[in-house]
Image (cartoon, helix red, strand yellow):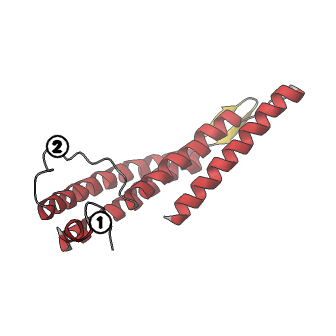
Amino acid sequence: MRINLGVGGLAIVAMLVHIIIDVTARHLFNIAVQGTLEIVSFYYMVGLVYLAIPLVQARDDHIFVELFTANTSPKRQDVMDAVIRVFSATLLLLFAWVTVREALHQTSIGAVVEAGTDTVPVWPTRWLIPLSMVSTAILSLWQSAYLFRHAGERRESQGEEHTYG
């Protein structure tokens, strides 16, 4: 997960530098850096969004709605969370399968977008989506196995904090 955090941090810095150079060049020299919008949209933003999903899962920072489970025992809450994580992993793997097919198609045709008078290849970023989905599914399954094995223990001994391992 540190790799995701590092790559995400680099993407933010690269995006910041890229945009600053583009804006500065436009205002000082009346020259636009070709492809800025496309690179920001298809590389930096895609990386930031999809690399963050497994990181959020690893930190257990997704939104939990406990409207119907708030008054149940910690063990029952953990078992329900584990079942939901298995269901989530199943959906994530389905998304991964669909997005791998699309990534294969985009790679085979060498997908590009027009950027002024040139083109920017966008097919490489299509692979970030299934990578994100598979890694998040693996994390969900690992967390689910932990919850099934230690149902109720972590909340009783550590308060409401969500920790694994």
- Residue 98 x, y percent position in the rendering: 37, 48
Residue at image coords 53%, 65%:
2
Residue depicted at x 43% and y 52% = 53
Q: CA distance from mark 2 to mark 1?
A: 22 Å
Toward the viewer: 92 or 51?
51
The nearer-to-camera label among 2 and 1 is: 2
**Circle 1 Cα neighbour tier, 10 Å, few/some/many (<14 / 14–19 / ≥20):** many
Quadrant in which residue 22 is drawn: top right
- The residue shown at (84%, 32%) is 25
Q: Secondary structure at mark 1?
A: helix
**On screen, 13 above or below 140?**
above
- Which quadrant does the C terminus fall into? bottom left
Q: Amino acid at mark 1?
A: Gln
Circle on res. 143: 1
Is 57 above or below relative to 14? below
In-image side of 71 versus 133 (left or right): left
Tell me residue 16's x, y (percent): 69, 43
Q: Is residue 110 visible?
A: no
Residue ID for mark 2 = 67
Query: Residue 85 at what x, y percent from top left?
Result: 25, 57
> Residue 55: x percent and y percent?
45, 57
Q: Please count the marks in the image.
A: 2
Query: What's the amino acid at mark 2?
Result: Leu
Return the disc, 2 or 1, that comes first in the chain's sequence.
2
